[in-house]
């Protein structure tokens, strides 16, 4: 009963997934026995430095790459045995692979709509072109589009069949900040309206933080940690504080040293230092600075970000 | 196999054909140019001998189109997806390799048929040569056998593309030309030196062109040769389809399908 319930609740289940490539006679393990599951309606992020195994994982889940071992279940089915069902109910968008460049966006979408058996596809295509602000470019060939327009065309294809499971592999690369923000809005909106499950990879930490319910950090083909972004940020126990004073910068520096904080750098009238988050030490230090009578002209406190965790994990490699 | 997916891919290849001028050139320009070159050559030789050179050469040129187009279209349409890095999206969709191939085979045959009709008309208008006057039954049989043989070559090349990627793309244009001297398209098997005749005797197309010449010259057709050509073309086609399937699987294993280069 519990197993059945688990099966129904998770749209993506991965157990001990392994993929090894051979290069010049040498075996390179790209994905090294990873396991994770994504709940129905969840946006799950895969984060990690280049070569961590994120895209290889997505390629195996979409059936484009054959796994060496392990089990994968999408919508409760093993894809190898039920490709037609799994692929009809899922889709993928990546910035690294184009649609057919000889065809226009509209022609490509017509082809994919038919491949996925979409009914009333002209209406669906018009809706998607409108949504991604490509209506006036619909009849332009892919080869004549900018990289941002190409990325949006691929996203149109990704939503053409109203997928229940969507794989988004660095799908916002090349988009300007405005369009990237709108695209994140569209993804979030689509996910909420359709209760869609999304596996998302990106190098943009703020994007992952904004969209993903949970995040798996990958490094060297392994998953280092899976958690929410707020819990992951707790792994970094330091805040960065930037203080600018009108005068007495040397005194402030001496004071900070006596408090045992790490000064990162100082410039003109500013000092940037790191202070541990344990036992409210940061608040105590700032409070003491005020009580000592330093005249502050600027105070900026930066909590740990996913970037910090990303850098920490990447450097542990 | 699902008809709607095959239709979707046929639509894609139709779009490629109308969007790319060079794909239209394949159907119109090169075959017609070939017909003019061989037609004028034949008219010149005709004056020097009593043999019906015009019918033999033009008939051969028109029929060779089926081998040429059938093989090259499979290879080039597979390459189109590599060139545009589109294999990723194509095979992430529910499409199966078999549906992909059936659609390429159909579009290839339709394109070859369009070329055939065009050459048939050009042959009649410029040289008063009607290929169907030879023997409609023999021409229909030849078209069928040569198309299957062409598909087999196309599958062979496509299998190599899936296995090794774009670096062997030159095969798409060269394999058919490599075979043509040994397929006895423009001259009889007896005209070849012994070593070349040995190679020619195992190529299915050889017996089709031998039969064409026999029919034009009013001599008995080698029926055993035609039987060999049809059976061996079918066997070759099935074997190449399996080879392609294995290569496709290999490309899923090595990651070439994802990288597409």
Image (cartoon, coloured by chain):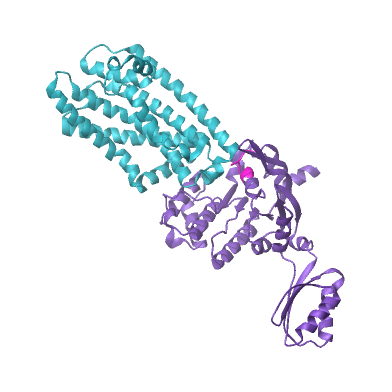
Chain colours: A purple, B cyan
Instruction: Check residue A229 for magenta coloring.
Output: no
The residue depicted at 33 percent of the width and 34 percent of the height is B112
Name the residue at 46% across, 29% down.
Answer: B156
Residue B119 picture location, percent across and down: 25, 33
Q: Which residue is outermost to the right?
A: A279
**What residue do we see at 38% from left, 18% from top?**
B199
Report the side of A97 relative to A239 (left or right).
Answer: left
* Residue A63 is covered by the magenta coloring: yes
Residue B134 appears at what percent x and percent y? 23, 21
Counting from the top left corner in percent of width and height, residue B97 is at: 52, 35
Q: Which residues are magenta?
A: A59-66
Judge whether A185 appears above or below B57 on screen: below
Q: Where residue A71 sits in the image (x, y, percent)?
A: 71, 39
Please tell me which residue lies in front, A161 or B126: B126
Residue A278, quarter of the rendered image: bottom right
Q: Give the tally of numbered discs.
A: 0
Q: Main secondary structure of the magenta part?
A: loop
Q: Is residue A269 above or below residue B31?
A: below
């Amino acid at each position: 009963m519990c197993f059945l319930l688990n099966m129904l609740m998770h749209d993506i289940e991965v157990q001990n997934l392994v993929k090894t490539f051979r290069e010049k006679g040498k075996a390179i393990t790209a994905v090294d026995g990873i396991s994770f599951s994504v709940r129905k309606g969840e946006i799950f992020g895969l984060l990690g430095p280049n070569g961590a195994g994120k895209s290889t994982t997505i390629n195996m889940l979409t059936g484009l790459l054959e796994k060496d071992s392990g089990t994968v279940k999408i919508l409760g089915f093993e894809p190898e045995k039920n490709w037609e069902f799994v692929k009809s109910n899922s889709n993928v968008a990546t910035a690294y692979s184009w649609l057919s460049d000889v065809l226009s966006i509209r022609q490509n979408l017509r082809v994919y709509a038919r491949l996925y058996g979409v009914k009333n596809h002209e209406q669906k295509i018009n809706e998607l072109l409108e949504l991604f602000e490509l209506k006036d470019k619909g009849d332009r060939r892919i080869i004549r589009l900018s990289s941002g327009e190409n990325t949006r065309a691929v996203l149109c294809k990704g939503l053409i069949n109203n997928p229940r499971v969507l794989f988004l592999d660095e799908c916002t690369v090349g988009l300007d900040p405005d369009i990237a923000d709108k695209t994140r809005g569209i993804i979030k909106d689509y996910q909420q309206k359709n209760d869609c499950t999304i596996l998302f990879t990106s190098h943009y930490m703020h994007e992952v933080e904004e969209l993903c319910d949970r995040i798996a950090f990958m490094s060297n083909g392994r998953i280092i940690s899976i958690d929410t972004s707020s819990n992951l940020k707790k792994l970094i126990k330091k805040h960065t504080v930037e203080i600018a004073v009108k005068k007495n910068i040397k005194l402030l520096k001496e004071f900070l040293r006596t408090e045992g904080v790490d000064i990162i750098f100082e410039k003109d009238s500013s000092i940037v230092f790191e202070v541990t988050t344990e036992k409210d030490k940061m608040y105590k230090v700032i409070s003491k600075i005020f009580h000592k009578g330093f005249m502050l002209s600027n105070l900026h406190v930066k909590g740990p970000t996913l970037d910090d965790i990303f850098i920490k994990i990447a450097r542990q490699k | 196999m699902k008809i709607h997916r095959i239709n979707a891919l046929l639509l894609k290849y139709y779009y490629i054909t109308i969007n790319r001028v060079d794909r239209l050139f394949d159907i119109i320009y090169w075959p017609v140019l070939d017909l003019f070159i061989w037609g004028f050559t034949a008219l010149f030789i005709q004056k020097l001998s009593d043999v019906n050179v015009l019918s033999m050469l033009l008939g051969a040129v028109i029929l060779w189109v089926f081998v040429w187009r059938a093989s090259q279209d499979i290879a080039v349409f597979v390459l189109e997806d590599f060139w545009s890095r589109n294999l990723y999206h194509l095979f992430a969709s529910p499409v199966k390799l078999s549906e992909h191939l059936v659609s390429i085979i159909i579009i290839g045959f339709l394109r070859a048929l369009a070329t055939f009709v065009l050459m048939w008309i050009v042959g009649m208008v410029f040289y008063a040569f009607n290929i169907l006057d030879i023997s409609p039954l023999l021409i229909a049989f030849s078209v069928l056998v040569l198309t299957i043989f062409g598909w087999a070559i196309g599958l062979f090349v496509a299998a190599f593309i899936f296995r090794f990627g774009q670096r062997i793309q030159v095969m798409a244009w060269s394999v058919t030309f490599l075979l043509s001297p040994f397929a006895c398209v423009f001259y009889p098997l007896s005209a070849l030196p012994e070593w070349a005749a040995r190679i020619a005797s195992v190529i299915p197309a050889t017996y089709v062109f031998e039969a064409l010449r026999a029919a034009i010259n009013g001599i008995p057709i080698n029926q055993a040769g035609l039987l060999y050509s049809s059976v061996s073309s079918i066997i070759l086609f099935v074997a190449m389809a399996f080879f392609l399937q294995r290569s496709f699987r290999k490309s899923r294993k090595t990651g070439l399908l994802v990288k597409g280069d």
